[in-house]
Image (cartoon, grey):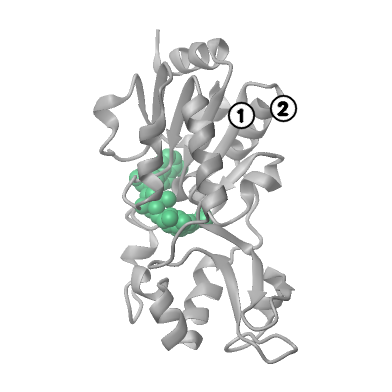
Amino acid sequence: MNDIERLRDIVKSSRSIVFFGGAGVSTESGIPDFRSVDGLYSQQWDYPPEQILSSTFFMAHTEEFYRFYRAKMLCLDAKPNAAHIKLAELEKEGKLTAVVTQNIDGLHQAAGSKRVYELHGSVLRNYCMKCRKFHTAEYILESEGVPRCECGGLIKPDVVLYEESLDDDTVSGAINAIHAADTLIIGGTSLNVYPAAGLIRYFRGNDLVIINMSPTQMDSSADLLICGKIGEVMSAI
Ligand code: NAD
């Protein structure tokens, strides 16, 4: 039996799959990840991406933050790929209970997924730090320099920056889903970003599947390890 057939079998016999993913899920939609060879860490900026995407940097160099953010994080033309679409279908069929994602691009919801725990927030939500008014991603994209609210307040993306903590309700929802799952599929993530990557330790189910293009620290624990493009793999099952 080949890997795709094994994955198909696992999915068929599962009743509550949870998918845990990261930036690699959206590379086939044209959004660069961080750690692949053509990822954002390999591109030249005045500061490393993890420094730009930190809370300290946001407050101290807001204009530079937004220059990077508009150019690299706001990919509003990107469309869901085969992986996003397959996961949404599995939820509709009653097989998949939740997607837990480190992504901030909103593509799982765009594909039709309903229960999505966005551990790192979303570029689609932005709020005024003074009056809390909500602003769209288009508002941020079309603004110049530092985006400001009508009240004059600074607008911040509802994205968890480095040095900030994750939202408690999102984390508990994700932990409960992972803990109750019979199958956990991990895909498109280097599992390098904490505390997000630590949530997979709550898995107690039967089958741990990893679909990734490069090795991860969890590979030796996987019941099924597939090295490949997640969109291609998911569309083949
Ligand atoms: P990462 O860049 O650290 O790792 C991506 C992993 O996905 C790598 O191991 C790579 O080999 C693999 N990969 C790339 N394309 C793949 C594909 N088509 N199929 C299978 N595997 C593929 O990303 P991470 O682990 O998510 O951590 C980085 C952080 O970056 C996250 O916190 C996330 O919030 C943020 N981020 C998000 C986006 C987005 O929302 N699309 C984009 C860039 C970064």
Q: Mark 1 points at which residue?
A: 97
Which residue is more in the foreground, 181 or 51? 181
| Closer-to-camera residue (151/94) | 151
Q: In which quarter of the image is the N terminus?
A: top left
Q: Residue furthest top?
A: 1
Q: Residue 153's spot in the image, x, y percent?
A: 65, 88
SS at badge 1: strand
Residue at image location 39% in from the left, 79% down from the top: 56
The three-letter code of the residue at mark 2 reads Lys
The three-letter amino acid code for the residue at tag 1 is Thr
Mark 2: give few (<14), some (14-19) or many (20+) Cα within 10 Å. some
Question: What residue do we see at 57% from left, 49% from top?
Answer: 169
Q: Where is residue 14 in the image (x, y as percent from the top left)?
A: 54, 15
Ligand 1 within 8 Å, label 1 CB: no
Q: Residue at x 46, y 84 (%)?
A: 59
Q: In this view, does 180 lie to the left or right of 202?
A: right
Which residue carries the number 2 mark?
92
Residue pictured at 69% horizontal, 76% vertical: 132
